[in-house]
Image (cartoon, rainbow, N blue to C red):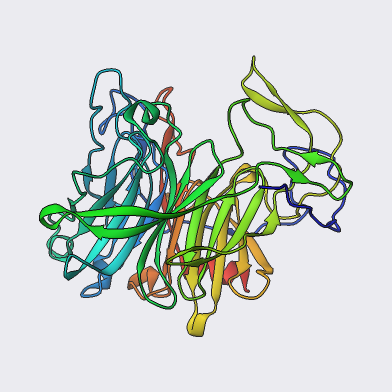
Amino acid sequence: MTPPVLPVLAVPLLLAPLLAAAPVTTPVVVPVSQTRAFADDPAASPANSDADDPAIWVNRRSPARSVVLGTLKEGGLAAFDLAGATLGTWPAPAAPTPDAAPGRFNNVDVLSGVRVGGQRRDLAFVTDRGRDRVRVHEVDARGADARGDVLTDVTDPAARPVFSSSEAEVDEQRTVYGLAAGTDRVTGTPLVLVTRRHETRVALLRVVPGRDGTVGTRVVSTLDLPSSFVLPDGTTWTPCGEPDERPQLEGVVIDSAHGVAYAAQEDVGVWRVPLRASGFGEPELVDRVRSFGVPGRFDPETEECVADGADPGFGGEHLTADAEGLTIAEGPRGTGQLLVSSQGDSRFVVYDRTGDNAVLGEFAVGAGRGNDSVEHSDGASVVTADLGGPYSRGLLVVHDGEREPAEGDAATTGFAFVAWSDVRRAVRP
């Protein structure tokens, strides 16, 4: 793809090129509850659990018994009640051979009432980053009501890798990464969107019936977003990264009501892409990270990028790389908000869901009510349905990348539950 030529943004020169702070006072909301901490440690239970991305399943029969799902990477998939208590965990697949990578669940999203195999089902779709598959779990309302088994793995056993042409390529780990589920605006066809690790490719998948009541997915279209950009001064800029890696995307969300998808390219910004069951429209970069255009080089000793020149001033004002988790808060008559995790400075930026996606405000999640603050959030999910109690106006669940107190030397993570009414009061869009 030819690098896009970008217009000049009227923004001040940033003095700290890679991690500039926003010159505003950020409103803070406090979690109502949180999940237990998960440790990325072989001795933990479940082992090697690294919380990453949440999704919310709304129990239509009993909203107060709705369920939050969360990926734990090698630890599999977990289900929580609205108080944050763990209802169960479902393991990722073991490695097929001693030299192969094991299953590693990265992102999750939920579609309710999906018609597949002649019946309507509530399904959770998960990217198995380790094995380059989309796994499918069915949500059982009876299990949720009775506090029994909430999920059943219904993945088609014949599921093939999404991006890899062979199992040997799977082990190179340029595999499925981010995921979003939704429906076609016109036909109502269920759709799944996935990104590829270390690449700029996005794939559109159709949900298909498998054998004996199982569920699979099939790729129908792909889109390669740019890996380099022509800046307004005529120079070409490529985001810094390891020599064999392109500027990847992870956070994605489908706005089914408006027929678009949003994708966060971590070191670039947020793309809006028209979406139909048959494929993609022309992508548009609707916001950029602050470090957009800043020259950088990869230091092999530290395995990190360092600034390698002055900031030319072409970045955005709101997002500090990485741009990560995306979710949409549904409002009446097609209104609502798009939330984006500004992972580099632990904020969330709120955009108008409609029009030109104007910025409405921002917030951070602080400590309080016996709960930890949220840092470096990767994934997020929001519903605005009445779930009762503190969530009568809706629930926002966000990944916490630095759960305190930490457990030894292992990375400790979790999920925080925030009342959507608190966010609305803080942001006041």
Q: Is residue 66 left or right of residue 381?
A: left
Relative depth, front residue between 10 and 21: 10
Q: Residue at x 57, y 62 (%)?
A: 273
Relative depth, front residue between 132 and 27: 132
| Vertical relation: 280 (above or below) 249 | below
Q: Is residue 324 left or right of residue 192?
A: right
Q: Residue at x 85, y 31 (%)?
A: 309
The quadrant of the picture occupied by the C terminus is bottom right
In this view of the protein, can residue 82 be seen by the observer?
A: no
Q: How many marks?
A: 0
Report x, y in % for residue 53: 41, 48
| Vertical relation: 427 (above or below) 9 | below
Report x, y in % for residue 10: 86, 58
Report x, y in % for residue 326: 52, 57
Q: Residue at x 33, y 72 (%)?
A: 387
Report x, y in % for residue 416: 42, 52
**Residue at the limit of the structure toward the top, as seen here:** 301
Q: Residue at x 23, y 44 (%)?
A: 89
